[in-house]
Amino acid sequence: MIHHGSRNIFSSRHRHVLSEMVRLKSRYLLCEVCVSDRSNLLLLDDRAIYTAAKAAVARAHGDYGAALSSLGFSVKYLNAHTGIVFLRCRKSHYRLIWSALPFITSLENRGQRVPCFLNCLHVGGTIRTCQKFLVRYNTQQLHRMLPLCQSEAERSEIRQSVLSCTLQKEADDGDEEEEYE
């Protein structure tokens, strides 16, 4: 604490603010992995998307952009059946990742290369806002896909796959473990 004569320069309000930890704000990018053959989606895992996104940022923005975007960057959720991905990054650097997503043309996993592209559907400040958007988006997709089904079993499988959108927050974030539905 700095004293100026007998007075404190910082008021009690400022001392309280200075003593608290800094909260890092994040952005969540809700993306859809678009592939020509839907069975290729089952080959994907979060590590393949993570490495492809980091490589795309490095190609588009160089070493500086890659270093900035790697801080706090993670794949929070991947549904291999629907191709939905949640990417988390710091608020101050989300545009670096967002602008590099169109440069992802394929994902490589276990030696197999899957040609694809990532379509960013929504950018939100919390997982919850992205999930609310995803529920609305999935409902629209369900109404679009159900008339194209050939059998009741296919309808049931699509309905279950599209409407299963539960997320588990990871405990390593410092947050308590919480399930969103």
Image (tube, grey):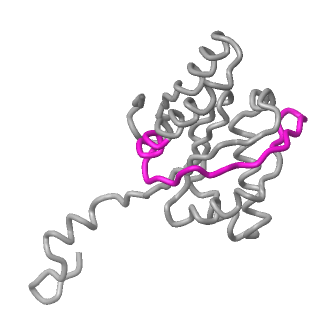
Residue 49 occupies which quadrant of the picture? Answer: top right
Name the quadrant of the C terminus. top left
| Picture layout, residue 90 above or below residue 65 | above
- Counting every numbered tag in the picture gives 0
Image quadrant occupied by the N terminus: bottom left
Residue 170 drawn at (x, y percent): 50, 35
In the rendered view, tell whether residue 65 sits above or below residue 170.
below
Residue at image point 84% right, 41% down: 108
The percent position of residue 4, horizontal first and vertical second, equals 17, 88
Decide which of 112, 63 is in the foreground and name it. 112
Tell me where residue 175 appears, x and y as whole percent. 40, 39
The residue drawn where x is 72% and y is 34% is: 45
Residue at (27%, 62%) from the top-left corner? 19
Q: Residue furthest bottom?
A: 5
Q: Is residue 25 left or right of residue 13?
A: right
| Segment tinted magenta in the rendering | 107-133
Residue most extreme to the front: 147
Q: Is residue 49 left or right of residue 171?
A: right
Residue 27 forms part of the magenta stretch: no
Residue sitting at 14 percent across and 80 percent down? 8
In the shown orientation, is residue 101 left or right of residue 180? right
For residue 110: magenta?
yes
**In the image: residue 173, left or right of residue 144:** left
Q: Which residue is more in the foreground, 25 or 138?
A: 138
Residue furthest out toward the left: 6
